[in-house]
Image (cartoon, rainbow, N blue to C red):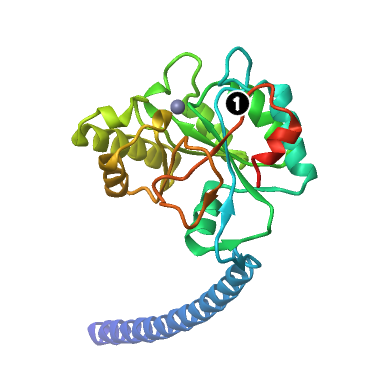
Amino acid sequence: MFLRGFKHLIRFSLLTLLIAGLSGCRGQSTAKNVTSTSQSQSKTVKSLKKAKKSPYAGWHHVKTVKLPILMYHSISSGNALKVPASEFKAQMTYLKQQHYRTLTTTQAVYALSHHRLPQAKVVWVTLDDSYTDNKTAAWPILKANHQHATINFITGFATHHNHLTLADARQMKASGAIDFQSHTVRHLDLNELTDQQQLTELTNSKRWLDQHLHQNTAVICYPAGRANQATIKAAKQAGYQYALSTAPGIATSQEPAYNLTRQRVTPGMSLATFATLLH
Ligand SMILES: [Zn+2]
């Protein structure tokens, strides 16, 4: 008797467990369906929001993009390559007053490669050699004016005195006012190196910036503008989309991508002369 009753109990318990298990499964799968529906709905909402927020919405097509690329180095005084902070400030303020939009590297690359502009007055501010005064003198001015500049960083100098460190670069990039592109590892005249040495300089500096700043570095700035045919080949092979030279002129979407001309800003330049660099 007792044994039979026990068997019944076991059978009943198993049945109960089975039913509970089945309904549990059903319950879970229903819950999953609800979740996946709400997930797909939120995905649709997100993609709609994304489409609305396209960073290039409103950019218009132009036959030839003309982009003045200003070239600075140190923001201090002492020689022909150094522009004093007071002059840099006056020039950035002039750009702001004249309603020039200071493009980021990503925007400049998009503008040149897609023949599109957000507005007629655009400029790309670049500073070569990653000097510490770019942080102490230029960065505060750019932030105050809500403007942007690109620093062409010498990756092998990140531990050198008077040069920006990786921590500086990360801090400045996070502000949104500065981005960093490559100015090679050692700042050597590329045209005097072997093809392989050139490729190493270009590849290693890009890898350093890509890894440390979590980006896809698109631009190489040739030290002292020195480059030859092998440099261009190496720049392409290393994965750069554009290269900056020191040859004067306003860059356009018609000129070779690996030899963009720039407008040099020199110390003591009047605002009237500065204005001529823009058009
Ligand atoms: Zn340089």
Residue drawn at 44 percent across, 38 percent down:
245
The quarter of the image holding the N terminus is bottom left
Which residue extends farthest right? 97
- Residue 97 in view, yes or no: yes
Residue 83 in percent (x, y) is at: 63, 23
Residue 124 in percent (x, y) is at: 59, 44
Q: In this view, does 217 lie to the left or right of 119?
A: left
- To which residue does mark 1 refer? 135
Q: What residue type is labelled 1?
A: Lys
| Picture mark count | 1
Q: In which quarter of the image is residue 160?
A: top left
Crowd tier of the residue under label 1, counting other residues whose Cα lies within 10 Å: few below 14, some 14–19, many 20 or above: some
* Image vertical order of residue 229 relative to residue 165, above or below: below
Residue drawn at 39 percent across, 42 percent down:
210
Residue drawn at 55 percent across, 72 percent down:
47
* Image vertical order of residue 275 relative to residue 7, above or below: above
Residue 130 in percent (x, y) is at: 50, 26
Between 195 and 153, the one nearer to me in the picture: 195
Residue 152 in percent (x, y) is at: 48, 34
Between 166 and 62, the one nearer to me in the picture: 62
Q: In this view, does 144 lie to the left or right of 50?
A: right
Q: Is mark 1 on a helix, strand or loop?
A: helix
Between 251 and 98, the one nearer to me in the picture: 251
Residue drawn at 57 percent across, 63 percent down:
116
Between 47 and 153, the one nearer to me in the picture: 153
- Residue 144 in view, yes or no: no
Q: In which quarter of the image is ligand 1?
A: top left
